[in-house]
Each structure stands twice: as C-alpha cells, then as structure tokens.
Image (tube, rainbow, N blue to C red):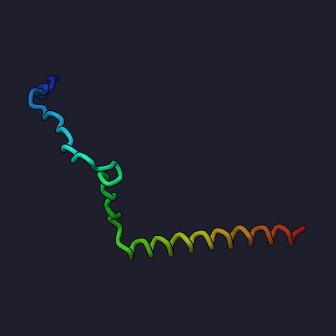
C-alpha cells in the first residue's frame, strides 16, 4: 500500500481583522439586525398546518385510547 501525499499547509490564509469602528457609535448602533430567515411564508404555513394536524391527530388517538380503556372497565 502506498501512502497518500501529504497536503501542503504553507498556503494558509491569515485571519482578517474586523473593520474599524467609528468613534462615538454605541454597541447597539454598531450591530446589524440578523438577516431574515430564508424560509418563505408558504413553507411556514405548510409546516404550521402539518404540525397542528399532527398534534390534533395524536390527541385524538390518545383520548380515544383512554375512552376505550375506560369503557372496558
């Protein structure tokens, strides 16, 4: 078996320093708001409908099982 050639590590990018901050700018003003989620509204609606129907079906099965067991006693 032959060993694979080791990769060269001499071409490493140096860390970039953060951009300078203007004097007199507070920390709140400096921060940018986080970008909006990349999920479109219709996917959020579909996920909401799916999750609520899943929860209601689970509750229905749970309650039906309880009632069935209660009636048998």
Can you give x and y, in whole percent of width and height, for residue 2 in the image? 14, 23
Check the image and name the residue furthest to the right. 73
Where's residue 70, x and y in %? 85, 69
Snapshot quadrant of residue 21: top left
Q: Residue 73's spot in the image, x, y percent?
A: 90, 67
Is residue 49 left or right of 44 when viewed as pictured? right
Q: Is residue 66 left or right of residue 52?
A: right
Residue under the point 71% across and 67% down: 62
- Classify residue 66 by image quadrant: bottom right
Q: In the drawing, does residue 26 fall left or right of residue 15? A: right
Q: Identify which residue is drawn at 50% across, 75% down.
A: 49
Count of numbered tags: 0
Residue 73 lies, with reference to residue 25, above or below; the image says below
- Answer with the quarter of the image where residue 1 lies: top left
Q: Which residue is depicted at the point 39% across and 72% down?
A: 43
Which residue shows up at 74% across the image and 72% down it? 64
Q: In this view, does 9 lie above or below 71?
A: above
Relative depth, front residue between 72 and 55: 55
* Front residue of this view, candidates 51 and 35: 35
């Amino acid at each position: 078996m032959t060993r694979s050639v080791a990769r060269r590590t001499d071409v490493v990018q140096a860390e970039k320093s953060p951009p300078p901050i203007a004097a007199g700018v507070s920390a709140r003003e400096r921060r940018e708001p986080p970008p909006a989620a990349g999920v479109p509204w219709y996917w959020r609606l579909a996920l909401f409908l799916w999750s609520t129907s899943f929860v209601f079906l689970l509750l229905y099965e749970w309650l039906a099982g309880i009632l069935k067991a209660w009636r048998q006693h």
